[in-house]
Amino acid sequence: MLGVGTGAFGAHGLKAHVSADMLAVWQTAVLYQFVHALGLLGIAALRPRLCRRLSSAAAVFLLAGILIFSGSLYVLVLSGLRMAGAVTPLGGVAFMIGWLLLALAALRGGRQTSGD
């Protein structure tokens, strides 16, 4: 729902107020928010088949990635604060770690113990 709102705000509310380049930055933030929110939903849906510790860690990293990557781009566009863009790569790293952990959670899923 938040992704739909931010996408609509960018398409309708920002269009007249920011450059085409900044609008493209906003759209990138929305796209990454959507894709990784779907990843979070996938983790929730597949949770019984995944290693719990690794899937929980994957979810944390995907959420952190959304907040840092997309959040920093939203701040950049809304405020013009170029420093906000400096932390964006940290969000990208969080995304990559999250997906790696999810893959490991899937690989270990069939071998988890009751304490997992």
Image (spheres, helix red, strand yellow):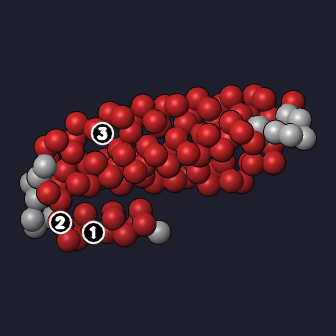
Residue lying at 46% horizontally and 36% vertically, measured from the top left: 94
Task: Name the residue type under label 3.
Answer: Thr
**Looking at numbered disc 2 in the image, what kind of residue is underneath it?**
Leu
In front of the other: label 3 or label 2? 3
How many C-alpha atoms fall within 10 Å of the one at disc 2: few (<14), some, or many (≥20)? some
Q: What residue sits 25% from the left and 65% below the top?
A: 11
Say the numbered circle drawn on residue 9: 1
Left or right? Give the position of 106 relative to 26: right
What is the quadrant of residue 106 in the picture? top right
Q: How many marks?
A: 3
What residue is disc 2 on? 14
Give the x, y percent position of residue 27: 29, 53
Whole-number angstrom distance, CA of label 3 to CA of label 1: 21 Å
Give coordinates of residue 63: x percent, y percent: 50, 49
| Badge 1 vs badge 2, beta-carbon distance below 8 Å | yes
Q: CA distance from mark 1 to mark 2?
A: 6 Å
Question: Which residue does the numbered mark 3 point to in the structure image?
Answer: 88
Q: Position of residue 56 (x, y in %)?
A: 66, 44
Query: Is any part of residue 31 visible from this angle?
Result: no
Q: Secondary structure at mark 1?
A: helix
